[in-house]
Image: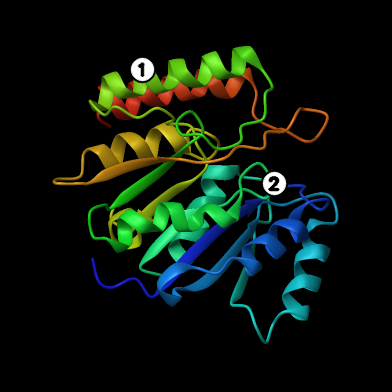
């Protein structure tokens, strides 16, 4: 990998008008190590609330100091589709996914960057289930579901991840763009994991991160149907290698 000069931060949003400006402030305030600059790429997946108004206002206010690029889908296509749009626009040597719901802390970008800067990693996953960082206590069955999906994914990929479903995945942009991704919703997580694992001589690392989870009343969107889709994606892209 070439020296890392820029981090592309991909933020897919759907009806996040209540939190998007707070997330953008957190991203803006992060000081990346090695004087790495930030490129913020926001993809609005046809939100029906005031998300777009909030983003455009923020972009205009910080136009002189922040590299913020904004894209909008005319129909709701799903998180995976929004991420593909963002990845296509990324110009940084490294990119990371940042959700707009305050569950993950941008101050921990540097934790994931360190193995990339040291030249030992091509991909770094931020695990909610390892390390001694804060983790909000919420749903037992969600945790069991996440661990089960990670276990089955590991069987298919021969990796030993602890958190395949994590949002915080950091990639060498060049490698990520070489992979064809097709899943439109939350199937992105098992799909990208399966396809990354097949890249020759790929170096995948994992590091513990914080997790400030949300309840459904607070806006959490993933549900049991997405869990079954994830299993299908593990079978399709992992075991069957499609």
Residue lying at the far left in this picture: please name it: 201
Q: Which residue is mark 2?
A: 102
Q: Position of residue 118 (x, y in %)?
A: 27, 60
Q: Answer whether residue 168 is visible to the viewer in this image.
A: yes
The disc, 1 or 2, on the residue closer to the chain's N-terminal end is 2
Residue at x-position 27% and y-position 22% = 156
Residue at x-position 42% and y-position 31% = 164
Q: Position of residue 17 (x, y in %)?
A: 81, 53
Q: Which secondary structure lies at badge 1?
A: helix
Image quarter (top left, top right, bottom left or bottom right) of the C terminus:
top left
* Residue 99 to residue 23: above or below: above
Residue lying at the far front in this picture: please name it: 132
Mark 1 against mark 2, which lies toward the viewer? 2
Q: Identify the mark at residue 234; answer none if there is no mark.
A: none
Give left or right: position of 22 versus 175.
right
**Quadrant in which residue 210 is drawn:** top right
How many residues crowd around disc 1 within 10 Å: few (fewer than 14), some, or many (20 or more)?
some
Residue at x-position 62% and y-position 48% = 99
Q: Which residue is mark 1?
A: 152
Q: Answer whether residue 240 is visible to the viewer in this image.
A: no
Q: Position of residue 32 (x, y in %)?
A: 49, 68
- Label 1 – label 2 distance at C-alpha: 28 Å
Q: Position of residue 16 (x, y in %)?
A: 76, 49
* Residue 223 to residue 193: above or below: above
Q: Which secondary structure lies at badge 2?
A: loop
Rendering colour mode: rainbow
Total marks in image: 2
Give left or right: position of 146 versus 202.
right
Marks 1 & 2, CB-CB < 8 Å contact = no
Identify which residue, 94 or 31, lies in the foreground: 31
Give left or right: position of 17 versus 2.
right
């Amino acid at each position: 990998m070439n020296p890392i000069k820029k981090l592309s931060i991909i933020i897919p949003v759907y009806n996040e008008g209540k939190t998007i400006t707070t997330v953008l402030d957190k991203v803006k305030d992060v000081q990346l190590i090695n004087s790495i600059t930030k490129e913020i790429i926001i993809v609005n997946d046809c939100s029906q609330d005031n998300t777009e108004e909030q983003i455009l206002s923020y972009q205009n206010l910080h136009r002189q100091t922040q590299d913020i690029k904004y894209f909008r889908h005319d129909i709701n296509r799903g998180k995976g589709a929004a991420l593909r749009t963002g990845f296509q626009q990324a110009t940084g040597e490294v990119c990371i996914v940042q959700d707009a719901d305050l569950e993950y802390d941008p101050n921990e970008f540097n934790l994931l960057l360190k193995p990339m800067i040291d030249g030992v990693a091509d991909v770094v996953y931020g695990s909610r289930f390892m390390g001694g960082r804060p983790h909000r206590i919420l749903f037992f069955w969600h945790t069991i579901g996440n661990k089960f999906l990670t276990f089955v994914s590991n069987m298919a990929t021969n990796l030993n991840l602890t958190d395949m479903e994590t949002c915080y995945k950091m990639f060498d942009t060049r490698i990520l763009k070489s992979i064809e991704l097709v899943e439109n919703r939350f199937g992105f997580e098992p799909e990208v994991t399966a396809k990354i694992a097949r890249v020759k001589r790929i170096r995948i690392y994992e590091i513990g991160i914080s997790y400030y989870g949300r309840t459904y009343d607070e806006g959490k969107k993933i549900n049991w149907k997405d869990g079954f889709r994830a299993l299908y994606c593990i079978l399709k892209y992992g075991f069957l290698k499609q």
